[in-house]
Image (cartoon, helix red, strand yellow):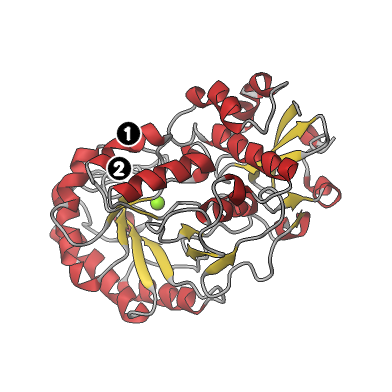
Amino acid sequence: MKITDLKCTILGGQPTIRIATDDGIDGWGAAERSKHYIKPHVLYYRDLLIGEDPRDVERVMLRIRRQGGFKPWGSAVSAIETALWDIAGKAAGVPVYRLLGGKVRDRVRVYNGNVRFRMGGSEPDDYARVMKQMKDSPEGFSIIKQGIAFHGPMVREVDGFTYGELRDGGPHPSRGPLTERGLNHIVACVEAMKAVLGDEVGLALDCGPGFTVPDSIRLARAVEHLNLMWLEDLITGDYVPYVLADLYRDVTTATSTPIHTGEQIYLRQNFIDLIEKRAVSVIGPDPLDVGGIAELKWITEYADLHGVLMAPHGTGDGLLGLAALTQVCATLPDNFIAFEYPTASTEWWPDIVEGLPDPIVTDSFVTVPDRPGMGLNLIPDAARPHLSDEDADFFD
Ligand SMILES: [Mg+2]
């Protein structure tokens, strides 16, 4: 079997790729939906793939893996990796989880970082209100993650929140020391959310990046009595192209609150410091940024040997990302907590795929499908009307 083509289109805001083969099997993959600019980067790898056997996933990846980087520049390589596994599974007539070593669970726990309601402000009551809505949402989420502090509008909306400069541009651009008022405000919001969730639903917080080390320690200690699932990306994180494991270790060793990072990190090598130094308690690579699902599997196994937990990122990965996350997370060891549930980027996306369960999430779990490959296929006739003129030949 040989790869004959690699194509990319932005389908309802979701970067979507197709790897075509000479025996008619297609492999589907996606990148996070904020990356509408990624198509030229995907096509950059086209000539390196043509003529290769897609079932030799690792051999193909060795041709392209070095030419990627931290978020967003690992997403094209990652999308290709997942599409190769999709083909390899279909060619063998088995679900991808079998090729990764077999599943250890029939249904996979998801957490909510994506089903959202209008905040309207950054006061404790605003957080409590949306937390009630998320708790009541039909997916029955057992863990909810909320943005707070530098990760969202709070840094701007609360007067005197930080001694740092407020910046525009790019995701989460502000960083600096918290004022005492800022710290107290965060804690008040967290207490308001926990008052709603009680011990029925776990609460995780996406906090930065932007915190200093001493403020990270102060916040982590101030919320110890609330038994949070984790504090995410305090110091570095989303779109920061480095790790700073030693700084995280200073925080992690100073508190009983679990500390989490990793969604922007590309490749297993860049997790060595975090894992071997036990610099965080939980890591959260995104399979569509870290280099793919086999990369995520390897990192999880290595983390498990070091007592580090795993809660993969995935919020913008769309339905094809959901399929990839479900397959790989079915195979992960018991340091797996839950993956971040990705929703469809448009209302019509569920209508252009086959293999999607209905409902997708029941009691905070997604059932692992037994269809060959990733278990989710685009339906060309249904999807074609949504293609841009430029990509009208995407399915041809
Ligand atoms: Mg995050």
Residue at position x 17%, y 50% in the image: 251
In the figure, residue 273 lies in which quadrant?
Answer: top left
Q: Nearer the viewer, residue 52 or 206?
A: 52
For label 2, the residue is: 236
Task: Determine whether 134 is above or below 326 in the image.
Answer: below
Q: Percent from the top left, x then y, of residue 125? A: 34, 76
Q: Amino acid at mark 2?
A: Thr
For label 1, the residue is 242
The percent position of residue 369, horizontal first and vertical second, equals 66, 60
Task: Check contact, mark 1 vs mark 2: CB within 8 A.
Answer: yes
Alpha carbon separation for disc pair 1 and 2: 7 Å
Q: How many marks?
A: 2
What is the number of the mark on residue 123? Answer: none
Of marks 1 and 2, which one's residue comes earlier in the chain?
Answer: 2
Position of the N terminus by quadrant: top right
Q: Secondary structure at mark 2?
A: loop
Q: Is residue 63 visible?
A: yes
Q: Is residue 255 left or right of residue 280?
A: left
**Point 30% across, 60% down: residue:** 230
Of residues 128 and 331, the one nearer the viewer is 331
> Camera-side residue: 88 or 178?
88
- How busy is the neighbourhood of tag 1: few (under 14 within 10 Å), some, or many (20 plus)? some
Quadrant of the drawing holding the C terminus: top right
Q: Quick check: 176 left or right of 56?
A: left
Q: Position of residue 334 (x, y in %)?
A: 40, 59
Q: Would the CB of label 1 be found within 8 Å of ligand 1?
A: no
Q: Position of residue 110 (x, y in %)?
A: 49, 63
Q: Residue at x 71, y 55 (%)?
A: 371
